[in-house]
Image (cartoon, rainbow, N blue to C red):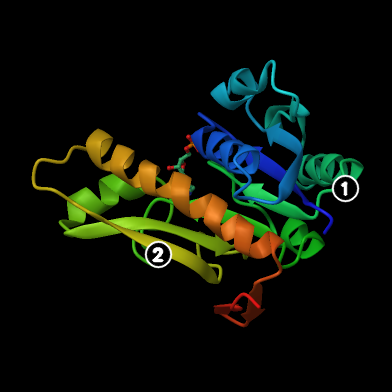
Amino acid sequence: MKKTVIGVLASGRGSNLQAIIDAIQAGRLDAKIGVVISDNPEANVLKRMAGVDIQALCIDRRLFASRRQFEDAVAEELAIHHVELVVLAGFMRILSQYFIDRFAGKIMNIHPSLLPAFPGENAQAQALAYGVKVTGCTVHFVDAGMDTGPIILQEAVPVLGTDTVETLSERILHAEHILYPRALALYCAGRLTAAGRHVNIIDKE
Ligand code: GAR
């Protein structure tokens, strides 16, 4: 079967991208990364890609007069690389309805909480401040809201009394690195169907 071409959008460290690359290399994910795009020229994710045989580039939001123009540039680059699924991996920008419509049902995100709890920035700090005993991570399809799209997979992670934002983030990140490739593998195998808010996983034949 033809490999699904994914395009990864990332703004920072790039550890989820690394987990995706590792899963592809280990044969756990039947996909090809067509392009990696960062909106931030300083992002570690770009340094991570140096020397790796994957096309990586920066589309600096600050160089565009409007979000529409920035998103057009991103969409154009994704099209050039024949991207079939857009994967947000620590991409710290809200995408407009305009962009989402261009890739309807074909954008995934990972978020470091059990949504709908703690959307937006600093989800781990939000969880600690609230005092929950369990948090985790969520992979979901992207809609125009803030972390509101249909949920694909979730993994729970305990919150310990001794946790700091750093220790909790690290524990969640470990779960993210397993969960995101699993969700992508389900998509690439054609095993996800979405009906409204509900994503169903089709059993293997
Ligand atoms: C991850 O924890 C991801 O869940 C989070 O940013 C981090 C990126 O790490 N994303 C969000 O908070 C999106 N709302 P990475 O750059 O090492 O993959």
Q: In the structure shown, which secondary structural element does the residue marked by tag 1 occupy? A: loop
Toward which corner of the image does residue 93 lie, by quadrant?
Answer: top right
Question: Residue drawn 82% across and 44% down?
Answer: 78
Q: Is residue 122 visible?
A: no
Is 138 situated above or below 176? Answer: below
- Indicate the quadrant containing the N terminus: top left, top right, bottom left or bottom right: bottom right
Query: Could you tell whether 136 is left or right of 95 in the image?
Result: left
Side (left or right) of 65 relative to 162: right
Whether pointer 1 and pointer 2 mark residues with C-beta atoms closer than 8 Å, the reply is: no
Q: Where in the figure is residue 66, as x and y percent of width and height?
A: 75, 41
Disc 1: which residue = 82
User: How far across and down, in percent of the image, does residue 177 sit?
Assistant: 46, 44
Q: Residue 29, image x and y in percent?
A: 64, 50
Residue corresponding to mark 2: 115
72, above or below 143, in the image: above
* Nearer to us: label 1 or label 2: 1
Q: Which residue is drawn at the image coordinates 72% and 49% (left, top)?
A: 31
Between 15 and 125, the one lying in front of the other is: 15
Q: How far apart are marks 1 and 2 (CA)?
A: 31 Å
Specify the quadrant of the image occupied by residue 7. top right
Using a 10 Å C-alpha cutoff, classify the residue at mark 1 as few (fewer than 14 neighbours), some (14 to 19) or many (20 or more): some
Look at 43% across and 52% down and name the residue there: 120
Q: Quadrant of residue 164?
A: top left
Asked whether residue 104 appears in the rendered view, the answer is: yes
The residue at the point 25 percent across, 53 percent down is 127
